[in-house]
């Protein structure tokens, strides 16, 4: 991911656990995935396993994930878990693994060389009077555009390439009634362009262990979550953002935080979960949480990675397996240029779902500013926004997940096309399916 700040005048059944607390410090815990029976409760699990915290729990899939102290995990087995705790005699331990690291995906080295990840200096703040910002409604209350002509042209080219103006005309709900969860570095709760669009009642900070997932300006990925949210809201401006701060300002966080956030988003009514982050390690615990969300009809969007290499990051890398068929609601997204060629930084693979533009995308940044953001981190939320827009028509999750790929525009990269999925997001063509 890279973010280049613009210097302009506006300038990341009973028994279901209430997942709110942050697990023990990373390195002090293991993640234990269990098969559970229909009668098990989370309370029974925590009372049986000393020091355990339930971070995922789902009777539909019959799975649970515990964060367990290392010394306890080393002694844990199906044999020493009581039948009462597991709920049936055939239940048991499926896997024990380290609480790994998930992070904002590696920056594009070419962008770094150009200094696009440096956003210090020349910054001014916005003040008062803005009516809205989405789909081209870029005016002050007094009718004066707040973007200069060059930036307005850049934003307009992006919207037109995706067919956003047409889609928003066809679907005037604009995402109303749909909540998108962003699991990221947090969000600027005070940004003027995000006001009224954040579900503050159901957001959570897993780093600070409180209900205020505010971005913190103390690391190199500051603003990542805010920028992700801004991309979603350009496409579905009436959607609500449920912000989960699972990553520190440096863009990294314990996998247990991400799993707990997926669980909380699923419990709190999110229809789409955006994961502009990833891991190079396959995780049974993470896959368990994603599968539980999918079982509830929630769509999960994952950026593909920015190393420019073949193969995408997890959880998207697990697409095409028995657990996550290519037709599932897990969608892995790579980045292309506006002329539909693979971005140099974008990872690619035969199991990639699709692509979206991910270079110099105008979006929100903390402290009432805007940025131009690059990376698959900003291609993924375009797909999340399109899903939210379509879902607000009353369409089913399965229908929208299928159609967002079926309506994609063909990519024009002869070298990489076989590994760029169904093509590039076309929000206008998607909207045509529903209106």
Image (cartoon, rainbow, N blue to C red):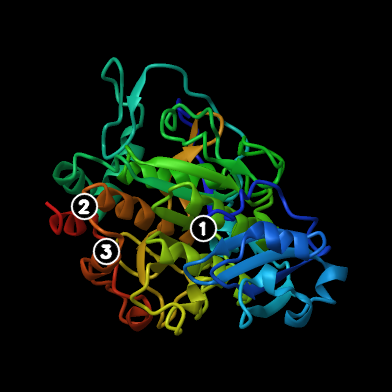
Residue 109 position, x and y percent, is 58, 64
Which of pointers 3 and 2 lies earlier in the amino acid sequence? 2
Task: For label 1, count other residues whose C-alpha is less than 10 Å away and answer few (under 14), some (14-19) or many (20+).
Answer: many
Whether the residues at callouts 1 and 2 have beta carbons within 8 Å, the answer is no
* Rendered position, 402 above or below 174: below
Q: Earlier in the sequence, mark 3 or mark 1?
A: 1
Count of numbered circles on the image:
3
> In front here: 421 or 242?
242
Q: Quadrant of residue 155?
A: top left
Rendered residue at 53%/27% (across/down): 190
Secondary element type, mark 3:
helix
Name the spot of residue 346 as percent of width and height, x first. 47, 69
Residue 160 seen from this side: yes
Q: CA distance from mark 1 to mark 2?
A: 23 Å
Q: Is residue 21 left or right of residue 389?
A: right
Residue 154 appears in view:
no
Q: Which mark is residue 163?
A: 2
CA separation in Å, label 3 and label 1: 18 Å
Looking at the rendered image, the quarter that the N terminus falls into is: bottom right
> Which residue lies under the disc numbered 1?
276
- Disc 1 on helix, strand or loop? loop
Residues at marks 3 and 2, CA–CA distance in whole angstroms: 13 Å
Q: Which mark is residue 404?
A: 3
For the residue labelled by badge 2, is the local secondary structure a helix, a strand or a loop?
Answer: loop
Q: Residue at x 69, y 65 (%)?
A: 66
């Amino acid at each position: 991911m890279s973010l280049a700040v613009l210097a302009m005048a506006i300038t990341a059944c009973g028994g279901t656990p209430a997942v709110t607390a942050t697990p023990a410090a990373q390195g002090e815990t293991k993640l234990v995935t269990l098969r559970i029976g229909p009668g098990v409760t989370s309370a029974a699990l925590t009372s049986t396993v000393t020091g355990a915290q339930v971070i995922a729990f789902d009777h539909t899939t019959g799975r649970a994930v515990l964060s367990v102290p290392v010394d306890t995990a080393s002694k844990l087995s199906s044999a020493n878990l009581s039948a009462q705790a597991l709920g049936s005699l055939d239940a048991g331990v499926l896997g024990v693994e380290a609480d790994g690291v998930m992070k904002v995906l590696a920056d594009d080295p070419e962008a770094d060389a150009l200094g696009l990840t440096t956003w210090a200096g020349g910054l001014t703040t916005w003040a008062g009077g803005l009516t809205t910002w989405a789909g081209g409604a870029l005016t002050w209350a007094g009718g004066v555009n707040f973007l200069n002509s060059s930036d307005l042209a850049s934003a307009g080219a992006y919207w037109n390439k995706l067919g956003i103006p047409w889609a928003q005309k066809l679907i005037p709900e604009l995402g109303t009634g749909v909540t998108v969860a962003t699991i990221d570095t947090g969000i600027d709760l005070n940004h003027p362009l995000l006001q009224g669009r954040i579900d503050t009642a159901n957001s959570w900070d897993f780093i600070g262990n409180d209900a205020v997932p505010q971005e913190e300006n103390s690391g190199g990925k500051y603003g990542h979550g805010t920028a992700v949210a801004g991309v979603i809201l350009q496409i579905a401006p009436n959607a609500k953002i449920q912000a989960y701060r699972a990553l520190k300002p440096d863009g990294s966080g314990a996998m247990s935080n991400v799993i707990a956030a997926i669980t909380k988003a699923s419990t709190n009514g999110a229809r789409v979960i955006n994961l502009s982050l990833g891991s190079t390690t396959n995780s049974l615990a993470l896959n368990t949480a994603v599968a539980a969300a999918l079982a509830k009809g929630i769509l999960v969007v994952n950026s593909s990675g920015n190393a420019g290499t073949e193969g995408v990051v997890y959880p998207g890398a697990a697409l095409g397996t028995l657990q996550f068929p290519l037709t599932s609601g897990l969608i892995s997204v790579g980045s292309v240029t506006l002329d539909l060629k693979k971005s140099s930084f974008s990872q690619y693979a035969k199991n990639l779902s699709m692509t979206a533009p991910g270079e110099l995308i105008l979006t929100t940044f903390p402290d009432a500013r805007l940025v131009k953001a690059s990376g698959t981190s900003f291609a993924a939320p375009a797909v999340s926004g399109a899903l939210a827009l379509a879902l607000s028509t009353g369409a089913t999750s399965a229908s929208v997940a299928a159609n967002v790929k079926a309506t994609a525009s063909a990519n024009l990269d002869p070298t990489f096309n076989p590994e760029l999925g169904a093509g590039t997001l076309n929000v206008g063509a998607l909207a045509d399916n529903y209106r």
